[in-house]
């Protein structure tokens, strides 16, 4: 093969290697190992996720039904989890109501206004440190601060605020990263057109950061759904019997402590409920309820994540259009 | 229209520095035309440094109204940095400091109480890489006027149309102004969109930082044609690495190079026709004849 083209192989860089020359055996092996290893890791993660979902989907087969979602808990029959499901959504909403706006504003400050100096580095370090404090410690702090010192007792609000302490740093850090990822030239283009800094942030930087901000919201919300330890000590563990969703009369003295709309009542969430039933539950249907609740919780997380992405897409369209 | 002396000078130096670059005949006429014009930008003793490093040292030059000034020179000679002080984009770089004055129609733009927002409306900028916003074509062009509070739909539509027409892009995009993203256009179209976006803010001066360096030759020529057209109404300052481009498009050329401490400085400035045929400075001659840079 090579003899006929030997003259042509004398190029300016000296003799060329034939295209047919085999790469060294070591590098081929390394390439294959890397490919297989990376593939394997990806498949492993997918299988793990699939296994978890499949396990609870199968376990929940005979349990999850419309009545399981819509009924009150019961001691004698399977019953449902409506009040607890409601509490999960309620505490999520309450937490995100504080964490998302404050986190995004904080992220904007950290990314667009605060420079790189000792103070902002200290803030970033604190954000990352608080995020990795064990949640049980945050729960204890919430117990001391909200439940005892502020005499709030076990409340949804106390739980949401403890969760916010835990989540806000993460939300801020992720929001900052999402905003920083917007290319500098987009900012330059806007500023060079005579837009002010705030206009640039509002009309260019934030809209372009929305996919990243949605990821930040999803990751933060995921921790709210899954968090049990923080809420054990702050929003309580009692199983609510029945919620009257038509109880809107604020003037009734019982409203604050019994209405499902009130933030000043104890609120056991799905994660806490699962933990409680699993460790202390005695009822005959305990295992079914745990499996069903877990399946519902997974479903809730999936619905929330897909919903958040949908809202993100809509927002991007709205914000970049005007 | 050329002066007799210039003709004579051409005759005395029969071997022009660059044969590859043919200076359009039109340019000779334009040279004389710009002489009588008023001064739009007057930069005096401008030095720019980043921290300890001096990027531009003591540059003074003037830009005639309704003319095209080309800044040429090797990489790192401070052309872009110098250009960016005309609309104070250097403000955005931490640690950058500018000495000297840059007057826009007699007003020093370096003055701390100058409104950079208003300055940048009057002095628009087109960047090296086309950078339309990821929005519709319409929203891209309407961006500047909207930020200044223009809400009236009819007025905006009118302004978008005029701006796109002036940027020679209207015919290509008029059917999907609102449907198509600015990013869905070709590179050359994107750059004309960026020019339209600047025109919509009704500027007096347009700064172009290597506006065609990321474009193919055909798109480049279209941008150059457009610049010649825009020159009738606007003052244009262009930074370019492409000497043919400077020769084809500009009325006045300023040659920058680097000193031994790597600070950029202005070697000489003059009518483009003369700079490319009979530069005064040895450094200029070496650069444009390809012996350096």
Image (tube, coloured by chain):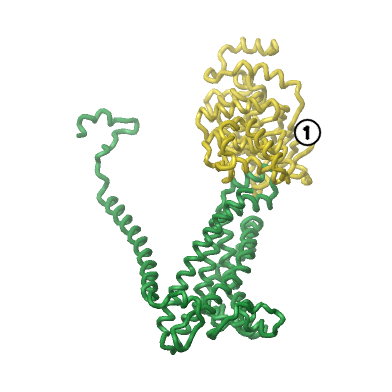
Chain colours: A green, B yellow
Give the camera-side residue of B279 and A212. Answer: A212
Quarter of the view holding residue B90:
top right
Give the camera-side residue of A127 and B137. Answer: B137
Classify A285 as above or below B15: below
Percent from the top left, x then y, of residue B34?
72, 22
Residue at 60 percent of width and 75 percent of height = A160
Percent from the top left, x then y, of residue A317?
58, 51
Percent from the top left, x then y, of residue B243?
56, 26
Residue at 62 percent of width and 37 percent of height = B126
**Residue carrying label 1:** B105
Classify B217 as above or below A278: above
Disc 1: CA contacts within 10 A as few (<14), some (14-19) or many (>=20): few
Task: Please state the chain letter of the residue tagged with numbered disc 1 in the rendered image.
Answer: B
Quadrant where the C terminus of chain B lies? top right
Give the camera-side residue of A280 and B173. Answer: B173
Residue A234 visible (yes or no):
no
Q: Is residue A155 left or right of residue A53?
A: right
Quarter of the view holding residue A49:
bottom left
Classify B243 as above or below A62: above
Quadrant where the N terminus of chain B lies? top right
Q: How many marks?
A: 1
Residue at 44 percent of width and 89 percent of height = A282
Residue at 70 percent of width and 79 percent of height = A250
Secondary element at image label 1: loop
Classify A252 as above or below B177: below
Give the camera-side residue of A51 and A104. Answer: A51
């Amino acid at each position: 093969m090579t003899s006929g083209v030997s003259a042509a192989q004398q190029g300016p860089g000296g003799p060329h290697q034939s295209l047919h020359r085999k790469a060294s055996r070591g590098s081929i092996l390394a390439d294959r190992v890397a490919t297989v290893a990376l593939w394997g890791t990806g498949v492993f993660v997918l299988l793990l996720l699939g296994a978890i979902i499949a396990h609870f989907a199968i376990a929940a087969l005979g349990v999850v039904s419309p009545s399981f979602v819509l009924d009150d808990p019961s001691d004698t029959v399977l019953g449902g989890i409506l009040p607890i499901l409601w509490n999960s959504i309620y505490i999520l909403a309450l937490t995100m109501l504080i964490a998302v706006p404050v986190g995004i504003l904080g992220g904007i400050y950290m990314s667009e206004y605060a420079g790189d100096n000792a103070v902002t580095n200290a803030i970033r370090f604190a954000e990352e440190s608080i995020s990795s404090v064990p949640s049980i410690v945050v729960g204890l702090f919430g117990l001391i601060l909200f439940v005892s010192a502020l005499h709030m007792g076990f409340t949804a609000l106390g739980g949401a605020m403890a969760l916010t302490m835990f989540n806000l740093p993460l939300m801020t850090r992720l929001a900052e990263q999402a905003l920083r990822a917007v290319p500098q030239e987009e900012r330059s283009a806007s500023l060079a057109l005579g837009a002010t800094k705030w206009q640039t942030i509002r009309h260019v930087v934030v809209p372009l950061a929305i996919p990243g901000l949605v990821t930040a919201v999803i990751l933060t919300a995921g921790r709210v759904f899954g968090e049990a330890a923080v809420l054990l000590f702050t929003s309580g563990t009692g199983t609510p019997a029945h919620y009257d969703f038509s109880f809107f009369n604020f003037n009734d003295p019982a409203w604050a402590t019994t209405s499902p709309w009130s933030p000043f009542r104890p609120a056991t969430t799905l994660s806490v409920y699962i933990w409680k039933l699993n460790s202390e539950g005695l009822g005959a249907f305990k295992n079914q309820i745990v499996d069903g609740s877990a399946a519902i919780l997974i479903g809730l997380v999936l619905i929330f994540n897909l919903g958040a992405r949908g809202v993100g897409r809509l927002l991007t369209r709205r914000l970049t259009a005007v | 229209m050329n002066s007799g002396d210039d003709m004579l000078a051409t005759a005395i130096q029969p071997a022009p520095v660059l044969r590859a670059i043919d200076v359009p005949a039109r340019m000779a006429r334009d040279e004389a035309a710009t002489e009588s014009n008023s001064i739009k930008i007057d930069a005096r003793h401008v030095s720019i440094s980043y921290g300890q490093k001096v990027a531009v040292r003591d540059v003074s030059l003037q830009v005639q109204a309704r003319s095209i000034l080309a800044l040429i020179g090797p990489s790192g000679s401070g052309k872009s940095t110098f250009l960016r002080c005309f609309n104070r984009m250097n403000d955005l770089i931490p640690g950058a400091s500018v000495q000297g004055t840059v007057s826009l129609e007699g007003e020093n733009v370096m003055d701390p109480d100058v409104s950079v927002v208003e300055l940048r409306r009057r002095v628009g900028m087109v960047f090296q890489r086309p950078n339309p916003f990821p929005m519709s074509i319409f929203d891209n062009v309407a961006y500047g006027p909207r930020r200044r509070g223009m809400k009236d739909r009819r007025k905006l539509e009118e302004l978008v149309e005029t701006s796109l027409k002036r940027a020679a892009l209207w015919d290509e995009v008029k059917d999907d102004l609102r449907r198509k993203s600015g990013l869905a256009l070709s590179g050359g179209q994107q750059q004309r969109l960026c020019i339209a976006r600047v025109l919509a803010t009704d500027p007096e001066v347009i700064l172009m930082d290597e506006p065609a360096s990321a474009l193919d030759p055909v798109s480049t020529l279209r941008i150059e044609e457009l610049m010649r057209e825009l020159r009738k109404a606007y003052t244009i300052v262009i930074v370019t690495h492409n000497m043919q481009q400077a020769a084809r498009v500009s009325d006045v050329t300023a040659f920058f190079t680097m000193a031994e401490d790597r600070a950029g400085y202005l070697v000489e400035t003059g009518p483009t026709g003369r700079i490319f045929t009979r530069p005064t400075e040895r450094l200029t001659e070496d650069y444009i004849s390809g012996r350096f840079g």
